[in-house]
Amino acid sequence: MLTYILRRTLYMLPLLLVVSLISFTLIKIMPGDYLTSARLNPQVTEETLQAQIERFGLDRSFIVQYGLWLKNIIRYGDFGTSFDTKMPVYRALFLGNKLQWTVFIAFSTLVLSYLFAIPIGIYSATHQYKPSDHIVTFLGFLGLSIPNFFFALVLLWILVVIFKVGDHGLTVGGVMDLHFYGEAMSWSKFTNILWHLWPVWVVIGTSNMAGLIRLMRGNLLDTLSLPYVKTARAKGLTERVVIYKHAVRNAVNPLVTILGLTLPGLVSGSVVVAIVLNLPTVGRSYFAALQRQDEPVIMAGLLFFSLFLLIGNVLADFLLAWVDPRIRYD
Amino acid sequence: MASRRKKKAQAQLEEQGYVSRSQAQMIWQAFRRHRVGNVGTVIVLLFLLVAIFAQYIGPMSFSYQSRKHPFAPPTTVHWRDDDGSLSRPYVYATTRAIDRTTYAAIFTEDISKKYYIRFFVTGGSQHNLFGFIPTTGHLFAARADDGTEAPVFLLGTDMLGRDMFTRCLVGSWVSLAVGPLVILIAFPLGILLGGISGYYGGGVDMFIQRVCEVFLAIPGLPILMAMGAALRGFGLSAMMVFFGVIVSLAIISWGGFARVIRGQVLAIREMDFVTAASAAGASDLRIIVRHITPNITSYLIVSATLQIPGMMLTEAALSFLGYGIQEPMTSWGQLLNAATNIGAMELHPWILIPGAFIVVAVLAFNFMGDALRDAVDPYSIL
């Protein structure tokens, strides 16, 4: 088991390497690099320009540039300096606790969508083809069909224009009111964060939940038709025990497995929502870097998302092996 | 002769109370049973029809800028006369004025003249029906009895005074085409590589699977944004950017298809009929084309349909961020690009309407795919 996990984890490295090469190529073939715009900027002196060229080997061949970039990462853990802000890349990408917020938003949304999706799925399955089941199914499809960014826009519009939350001293967008940044945690700060985060949870959560509800419903329906459930009923157990103790425990397994697969979707899928709702996440600094052609930051951003994706996959494999003892891992 | 004998046999069976149906008939019947799916299919077909006749249904050219009507609200269509009795629908011409204190634009109706909505009119803006028949005909226009015309903005106008209704209809063409076109590229690639991988196994399988894994390890939306930025930077024409977006989406998604198809082929390869065919001396090509492919075709069609909504959503998100479809082309996501700040949404809420088109179309595709999935497996008990 341990060797299996270790091997899966180590296997991430060559994949990341190839992904880094692909992203590097993509960014280098992007026309109009940073140097062109820097040359046109009268505030950038010739010396700083030369220093930049020297540092990143910008006048050398593609392979050398890639090698230099990779060497700096592996030997010094140095992802370079942001062309735009002159900060180290990890700061440009994670400034303002962006990494923590990204992880927190992803995990909290994950937990919340599971907390809601499983009971709703159970309800939907035990009320199959009843009107309530149809309503749940329809809402699930609706959640699946609304683009996240559009949902966020509409929610923003409803809060600001219809409910006029601004009149009650409430702001929308971001994760807390500006003056709370850097302040110690207090009750008012906590409630303020909650107020700012619920639209995020609703928007990202619904699209995530739709799939989970369908999966839970389908699995439970399959499980409920199995002979051992019939046996349990024949023994005279109450319906409650049959469903929760016998059926649900088996039906919930696949949901545990895909937990790892939903996580990366929450991170890279929330990029657009983060832009609309002005959230301090890595997705937004990636977007900003893309707009300014800040190559080192774009590169590091792509690697970050890729790493998250791979961690999610490994997590899924690990959970599958853990949940289902029939899986052989050799 | 044979078919007549067959028919006779079937008639005899039916007399005895048996019903025999072909596979296609069973699929069709199962499909018909899924009512919501049928509604979805009808909506999808309607959208296709609208996309084809977009320039005809829309009252003006999608790129026409009405300088006097920037951010005009949706035109009110009146149903009642001044005395309250029912009337033919009509609109008034509007004029734009600026409020001296708030600097907000105010559109006031000039109620001196009524412009009645007339259908199947000619003499409007010129466009090419089906792309090659030049015509000035439009589904409707608002004209007064003396022949003068007033603009009808059913869904308001954008910043440049372009009719949102027409733009939504024209944009539907792009939004609807993206999914199928991506599938058209990614699917053959996935079938070919996944098929080879599953059928031959061994070293080839190893290699193709590793390549797949690399493509699956690429984070979709972020890399598509970067690709969009690259496309934009090249200064390509809007049409080329459109194709570029499609190719990028295909590059990102073929790996997943190849994986799934490999699994299918792997399972079918072990079936007895494949062994029988190869024992009978059938070539690999024949086994793949005649024995394996027919068994996964329905599955392929269904999974293609189920992929389309996701593609549409991705295209919408990309275009919304400005890394997808570029002007002068338009799509629903690209139209929403105008709604990036809350101020604009507050003053001109109608710029959010293209989003409703996305929701309805994606929902319809989802339902259609769901019905198809249930239908292709007619032996399963629903």
Image (cartoon, coloured by chain):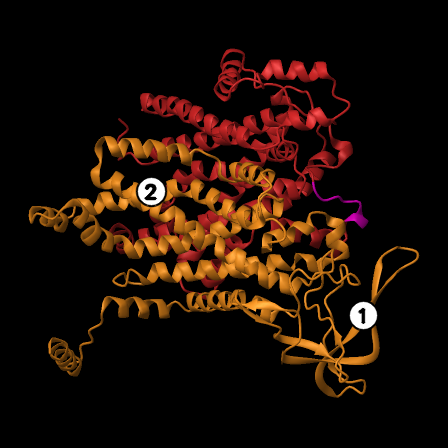
Judged from this view, the residue extending furthest toward the top is A75
Q: Which residues are magenta?
A: A166-173
Q: Element under label 2?
A: helix
**Residue B250, x across and y down, in percent:** 43, 44
- Looking at the image, is mark 2 or mark 1 nearer the viewer? 1
On the rendered image, what quadrant is the C terminus of chain B found in?
Answer: bottom left
In this structure image, what is the colour of chain A?
A: red
Residue B34 visible? The answer is yes
Please say if B227 is above or below B346. above
- Does mark 1 fall on the same chain as mark 2? yes
- The amino acid type, in three-letter code, at marker 2 is Ala
**Residue A176, x across and y down, in percent:** 71, 37
Image mark 1: chain: B
A233 relative position to A35: left or right: left
The residue that label 2 is drawn on is B258
Closest to the observer, B124 or B344: B124
At label 2, counting other C-alpha atoms closer than 10 Å, the crowd grade (few under 14, some 14-19, many 20 or more) is many
Residue A148 visible? The answer is no
**Residue A177, x across and y down, in percent:** 75, 37
The label number, if any, that marks residue B167 in the structure image? none
In this structure image, what is the colour of chain B?
A: orange
The label number, if any, that marks residue B94 in the structure image? 1
Q: Element under label 1?
A: strand
Q: Spatial distance from mark 2 to mark 1, Cα to Cα? A: 56 Å
